Image (cartoon, rainbow, N blue to C red):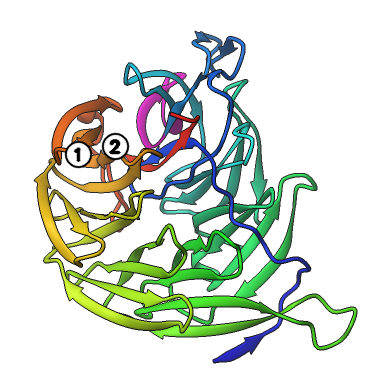
């Protein structure tokens, strides 16, 4: 284990909210907001009047190739989960890669990863007004990819800089940075008690755990203990179990899942789930299931979290990526990027029950080498209580 100094003060607390945001390659966050309508009628960036933001609402981060104001652009789509209809879209940055939401459900944050030109911004979105308030420039910190919200602040990964940072929307500043020393630090999760931060480092084949320590000197900010945990090849999908006891990570190249004990920071088990290229891993909120998207295999793989075995494979289409599980664990929303929709899976019957169209799938006719092509949900979050 290594000790690393930081630039900050307080330890974070993980945010749990009732908000559903969907990104066809990203993660899930829940936020508590009152049931009902969030906002008054808002206007689209093109000037068109949009419907009110419902509560609960499903927010889908669309990677792009959807016509907005006459141009193909990434957007945050606001969906009514009762009708599965998109009620509004908010433009965001190129190749938007992850989304998170504030505790009160008022603000959404989007990591703009970038395409051929590396991205270096975070979009701050007013969900009631359905508009981007500002696009915070991270400066030399490029390729923000993972996001998590705690105590009103936004934790992010800067993939190319091999570090994690913290953005304070109140002061509109980055107030904390901590290096990982690992290659391609891509995704980030925090335990509910906020005592431990985990990152998946894709090219180093590791997961890093960060724990705050008492400062060496009285007026110093907390020090941090860093534990580098070797896992299987190419970890990307990562999540913490609802009881904060385990971290599971799915690897892209060898079809395996590794389980890490949060207390000891050691891998307790690795087993093969036979994915061809795993992207996202999510626990159901009740802790009974773990869901893994297989982008190359076109499947959603459902694992019994207790038995540690695959109980169902569901063919959904091409380029299956992001996953969001409803707060009551009744259904999963899964991004099918190759077909420009979000599939809805009943987690009681383990059957496909519907789809939410995201955009014109004919639009993804150009593929930037090394980057996902076409319309697609990169990440998802649920807003509301149902």
Q: Is residue 272 visible?
A: yes
- Residue 178, compared with residue 371, is above or below; it is below
Residue that label 2 marks: 330
Residue 63 image position (x, y, % from top left): 38, 39
Tell me which segment is drawn in magenta: 60-76
Secondary structure at badge 2 equals loop
Which residue is located at x 33 percent, y 70 percent?
235
Residue 13 placement: quadrant: bottom right
Q: Are marks 1 and 2 in contact (CB under 8 Å)?
A: yes
Q: Give the crowd class for mark 1: few <14, some 14-19, many >=20 residues within 10 Å.
A: few
- Residue 5 position within the rendered picture, expressed as x and y whole percent measured from the top left: 71, 82
Q: Quadrant of the C terminus?
A: top left
- Give the residue at x 36% y 72%: 202
Q: Is residue 305 magenta?
A: no
For disc 1, the marked residue is 348
Q: Report the magenta stretch's main SS.
A: strand
Q: Secondary structure at mark 1?
A: loop
Q: Is residue 139 shown to the viewer in this render? A: no
Residue 75 lies in the magenta-colored region: yes
Q: Position of residue 98 (x, y in %)?
A: 46, 48
User: Residue 103 at x, y = what percent?
Assistant: 62, 41
Image quadrant occupied by the N terminus: bottom right
Q: Residue at x 58, y 20 (%)?
A: 38
């Amino acid at each position: 284990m290594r000790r690393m100094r930081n630039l900050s003060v307080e330890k974070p607390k993980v945010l749990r909210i009732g908000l559903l945001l969907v990104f066809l390659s990203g993660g899930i966050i829940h936020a508590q907001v009152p049931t009902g309508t969030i906002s008054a009628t808002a206007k689209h960036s093109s000037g068109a009047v949009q419907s009110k933001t419902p509560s609960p609402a499903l927010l889908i981060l669309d990677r792009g190739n959807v016509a907005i104001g006459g141009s193909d652009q990434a957007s945050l789509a606001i969906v009514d989960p009762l009708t599965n209809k998109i009620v509004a879209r908010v433009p965001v940055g190129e190749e938007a890669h992850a989304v998170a939401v504030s505790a009160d459900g008022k603000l959404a944050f989007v990591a703009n990863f970038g395409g051929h030109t590396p991205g270096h911004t975070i979009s701050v979105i007013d969900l009631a007004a359905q508009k981007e308030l500002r696009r915070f420039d991270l400066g030399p910190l490029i390729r923000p990819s993972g996001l998590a919200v705690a105590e009103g602040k936004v934790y992010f990964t800067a993939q190319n800089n091999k570090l994690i940072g913290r953005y304070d929307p109140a002061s509109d500043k980055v107030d904390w940075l901590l290096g990982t020393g690992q290659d391609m630090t891509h995704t980030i999760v925090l335990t509910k008690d906020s005592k431990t931060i985990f990152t998946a480092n894709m090219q180093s084949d590791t997961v890093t755990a960060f724990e705050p320590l008492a400062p060496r000197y009285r007026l110093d900010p907390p020090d941090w203990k860093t534990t580098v945990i070797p896992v299987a090849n190419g970890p990307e999908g990562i999540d913490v179990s609802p009881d904060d006891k385990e971290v599971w990570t799915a690897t892209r190249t060898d079809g395996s899942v590794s389980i890490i004990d949060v207390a000891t920071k050691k891998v307790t088990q690795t087993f093969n789930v036979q994915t061809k290229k795993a992207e996202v891993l999510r626990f159901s909120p009740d802790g009974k299931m773990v869901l893994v998207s297989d982008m190359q295999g076109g499947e959603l793989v459902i694992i019994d979290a207790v038995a540690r075995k695959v109980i169902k494979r569901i063919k959904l289409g091409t380029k299956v990526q992001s996953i969001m599980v409803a707060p009551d664990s009744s259904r999963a929303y899964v991004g099918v990027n190759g077909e420009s929709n979000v599939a809805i899976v009943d987690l009681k019957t383990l059957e496909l029950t519907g789809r939410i169209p995201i955009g014109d799938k004919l639009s993804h006719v150009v593929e930037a080498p090394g980057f996902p092509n076409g319309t697609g949900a990169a990440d998802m979050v649920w807003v509301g209580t149902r």
